[in-house]
Image: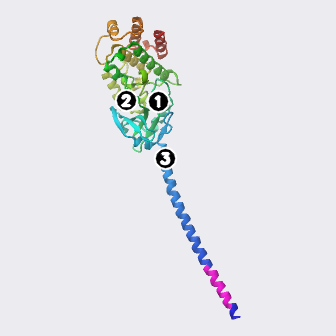
Amino acid sequence: MEDRYKIMLILSLSSSVALFIAVIMICICRRTRHSRNESWDEDSSFEVAEMEMKEEMIRFEGGEDLTCFDVLDAPGEVIGKSSFGTLYRANLVRSNTVVVLRFLRPACTRKVQDVMHVVQLLGAVRHPNLVPLCGFYVGSRGEKLLVHPFYRRGNLAEFIRDGNVESRNWNVIYRISTGIARGLNHLHTSLQKPIIHGNLKSKNILLGRNQTPFVSDFALFLLLNPSTTQEMIQDAAVEGYKPPELIKATDTSVETDIFNFGVILLELLMGKEPNEKQNANHNTILNHCILGSADEDDVLKLYHLAIACCSPLPSFRPDTKHICEKLQEIGS
């Protein structure tokens, strides 16, 4: 009988110990599981934060692999400045790609929610003679970065100012004129509503291989606040690009773009910046251009087209379709 009670006591103690061990094991497992969940949460929060960071970089064709880290960590150098921003030549280390980063000062730009529709529109524009928007970054303090391809041959203003033989070659002048016209025609006619460039000038024409022109900065003024846009117009007046009817930013139109295109044609034909006062005449034009395979009539036709584009009356200026047809006629 005594042995029976001993056995029962041992069994009870064994059960208690087993239960105690089981409780400890459950607690340990729960603690471990909780610890693992905490660790997963940290990883998850990092991934979410990373995703949120990536969401600040809006990518377009040609910039599908861009990340915020690529852009913000890219070593670069300043290649241009304006009253509203800075241009950087940057090397994206991960892809070993050179791009242009345009930094827009927060104080000079509209609110993010007010420009996103413009950014999406500009990101969708593609043409062989237009500089594409590959990415758009928005920082936490309202800073904005536009990512574009880098063109190693500089801009048209530099090309004209250098005055080398190529800048006086008729074939080159004609090729550049035609490319600009085609790019502008795409902006004005290929979408539901015309995209106004708003600041067309030789500094905003970039050059690629064989002096292929690429129109840049189109509709950039739509990202800027009204006071900054007005400063842009004042700068255009100083540089010689301001049409007579352009008083305020709301006056920009396809006709103001045509006027500026005419000024660029005169720059090409005369080899002079528009703010350098010089009376253009037939002899001036012909003396500047090396005719090459063209004849004098073609050169003078391009000159008369430039004069028509610069008409003081907007209604007298040809549209881009007529300009492209005229250029095709000259080149045939």
> Of residues 325 and 25, which is closer to you in this image?
25
Q: Please give the label number shown on residue 52.
A: 3
Range drawn in magenta: 5-17
Regarding residue 267, the answer to whether it shows in the image is: no
For label 2, the residue is 229
Q: What is the x, y in percent for residue 178?
A: 45, 16
Q: Quadrant of the N terminus?
A: bottom right
Mark positioned earlier in the residue sequence (2 or 3) = 3
**Which is in the foreground here, disc 1 or disc 3?**
1
Asked whether the beta carbons under mark 2 and mark 1 sit within 8 Å of each other, the answer is no
Mark positioned earlier in the residue sequence (1 or 3) = 3
**3D distance between C-alphas at marks 2 and 3:** 31 Å
Give the vertical position of 262 relative to 282 (above or below): below
**In terms of secondary structure, what is the magenta stretch mainly?**
helix
Q: What is the x, y in percent for residue 225?
A: 39, 33
User: Residue, x 40% and y 16% (percent of image)?
Assistant: 172
Q: Is residue 166 magenta?
A: no
Q: Amino acid at mark 1?
A: Pro
Q: Amino acid at mark 3?
A: Glu
At mark 1, the secondary structure is loop
Q: State which quadrant residue 14 falls in.
A: bottom right
At mark 2, the secondary structure is helix
Q: What is the x, y in percent for residue 150?
A: 41, 31
Q: State which quadrant residue 106 falls in.
A: top left
